[in-house]
Amino acid sequence: MTWIIGLGVVVLLGMILAVFAISLPRFRKIQSLIDRLNLVSRENLSGMLVIRAFNTQSFELNRFDSANRDLTQNSLFVNRVFTVMMPLMMLLMNGLSVLIIWVGAHQVADLTIQVGDMMAFLQYAMQVVFSFLMLSMTFIILPRASVSGGRIADVLKVEPSVKDPAVPRKFAPGSKGEVEFRNVGFRYPGAEENLLCGISFTAKPGETTAIIGSTGSGKSTVVNLIPRFFDVTEGSILVDGLDVREVSQRDLRDRIGYISQKGMLFSGTVESNLHYADEEASMSELQKAVEIAQAADFIEKMDGGMQAEISQGGTNISGGQKQRLAIARALVKKPDIFIFDDALSALDFKTDSALRKALKKETGDSTMIIVTQRVSTIKNADQILVIDDGMIVGKGRHEELMQTCAPYREIASSQLTAEELA
């Protein structure tokens, strides 16, 4: 009667493989549908005010309903497959029991085996089949686990485009943070043409280098190349005479205080966000940083002061307050190079002016690189670079550029009055 067990196992494995083949593509689709549903939900929550302002609640409701229905239909199909699988397995196990008793009864009648042998064989057979039934429970969750594992593996397989050199060089002791661009060109991966072409300038310690230009001209890309968020396609960027690709990313970024336009904050407290730059910074150092960043006044008004709660992304404070806290965080780091990527855009002119004066006084020995759209912010900069279509079309101080650079003169004339330009 051994062939009965073999037949049952073969049929059971066939059922499991059939279910696996049917459900695996569906699980792949379910994962993409979950992504789609999460995307729609996130957009609806983050853009709630815009949706209400344009009275598009019905449209967004239909969009969510469509994504939800697609996910529901696929999930129901997979669950129905698994729901049918269990009764079929129980039917198979009981069918095997009947078959063993029927075959065994004939052999008992023929005096080939005894009744006790038949019952023992029946028990052993049920244990074998039941073990395969338990194994099938694992196969029920295996398709989804396989898809999820594949997605994780795809992420882990991605090789970072920016890598440390095999033998990184070290910055010389006492180096001040001079930044030099030598004929730099850059294109994003997959792009056909360079975004930046022939960018050459030197930002010296103790001086302010400003970058201005129209939207999409490549200003932010220029400063993002300094901390090696991307690597240059052509030319080289030097910090204190060393190519940034020859030093480790950690050593390079330890010398840079980067402030982005969005002023990203993390959930926690004001103090924990400032300590993000330096865990060992004292309270007096934190207080000094917030005073320079013109953030002391609003921090004192917050419930708890330095211990006031900051929600994820800093959604419980204004854009200007986020930018000032981000600037204070960079000041706590005490870097040799400050990079302001349009980080003063949300500040009013009075706060902007006070902040720049305080920065000049306290960080006079550092290299200051400012990306901005405001001419008033950079009017007194030691060097102004005018970027247009990925190239430097003007370089000099405000007075020089007003005489020699038409794009800068056009930007300045659109923002400042004749008295302010004088």
Image (cartoon, rainbow, N blue to C red):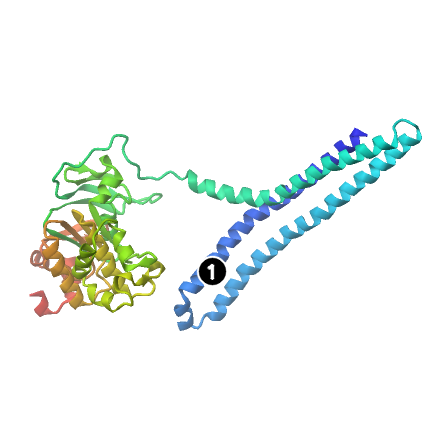
Residue 152 appears at what percent x and percent y? 47, 43
Q: Is residue 422 above or below residue 238?
A: below
Rendered-image quadrant of the N terminus: top right
Identify which residue is drawn at 30% across, 37% down: 163
Q: Is residue 421 above or below residue 221?
A: below
Residue 14 appearing in the image: no
Residue 156 appears at what percent x and percent y? 42, 40
Identify which residue is drawn at 79% across, 30% down: 3
Rendered-image quadrant of the C terminus: bottom left
Identify which residue is drawn at 26% across, 49% down: 279
* Res 344 quadrant in image: bottom left
Going by the image, does 280 lie left or right of 15? left
Residue 4 appears at what percent x and percent y? 79, 33
Q: Is residue 127 above or below residue 283?
A: above
Going by the image, does 147 lie left or right of 401? right
* Res 44 quadrant in image: bottom left
The residue carrying mark 1 is 40
Q: Nearer the viewer, residue 362 or 239?
A: 362
**Badge 1 amino acid:** Val
Secondary structure under badge 1? helix
Residue sticking out furthest to the top: 112
Residue 247 appears at what percent x and percent y? 23, 36
